[in-house]
Amino acid sequence: MHKEKCLKSISLIQVIMGIIVAAMSFVLVPVCGPMPNGKYMSCHYTGILITVAGVVLIVLALINYLVKNGALNKVLAIVQIVVAALSYMIPSKIIPVAIGVGMNGKTRYIGLCMKPMQCWNSFHASSVCLLIVVILALIYLAVHFVMKKD
C-alpha cells in the first residue's frame, strides 16, 4: 500500500508540473510577441512546442495515476523522460527543427531569439520544470524497481 501511495503522489506532482510547463510559454512567462510586421519570431514556435509537451506530460501523468498496470506505468515514465528531453533539445538546437525560410533566404529553426529577449527567461524556467519532470519520472521508476510489494 505504501508503494502505491508513493507512486500516486509522484504522478500527481507530475500532473502539476505538466500544467506548469503547458502554461509557461504563453501565460506564466510569455515568449516574445509578434514583430511589427505581424510575423512571429522563432521563439513563438518554441513556446508552442513547450506547451504541447506540457499537455502530453499531463496526459501521460494522468494515465500513470489512473492505471494500475506496472509494465505500462514503467513505459509511460520512460516516455515522459523522452518527451521532456526532446522538449529541451529542440529549442536548444541540439536537435534542429526547421520552420521555414527567413527573408534573407536562410533556414529558420525552432529556437530562441537573442540573449536579452524575454524568451530566454521563459525557456530557462521551462527547462527547470522539464528537469523536475525527468527527475520525478526517474524517481517513479526507482520506486517501481526498488520497493517491494506490501
Image (cartoon, helix red, strand yellow):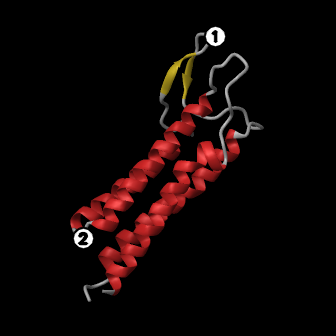
| Count of numbered tags | 2
In the shown orientation, is residue 89 left or right of residue 119?
Answer: left
Q: Nearer the viewer, mark 1 or mark 2?
A: 2
Where in the figure is residue 57, as x and y percent of width and height?
Answer: 42, 53
Q: As displayed, is residue 101 above or below residue 92?
A: above
Query: Circle 1 is placed at which residue position?
Result: 104
- Judge whether residue 89 can be spotted in this image: no
Q: Which is nearer the eye, 72 or 82?
A: 72
In terms of image quadrants, where is residue 78?
A: bottom left
Mark 1 to mark 2: distance in Å?
Answer: 54 Å
Measured as percent of width and height from the top left, residue 98 is found at 49, 25
Residue 1 visible at all:
yes
Query: SS for tag 2?
Result: loop
The image's mark for residue 120 is: none
Work out whether mark 1 precedes mark 2 in sequence or the reverse, and give the earlier one.
2
Query: Residue at coordinates 24% horizontally, 62% vertically from top-left?
Result: 72
Pinpoint residue 103: horizontal percent, then vertical percent: 63, 11
Q: What residue did someone put label 2 on?
A: 68
Residue 64, quarter of picture: bottom left
**Residue occupying image coordinates x 29% and y 64%:** 74
Give the residue drawn at x 70%, y 23%: 35
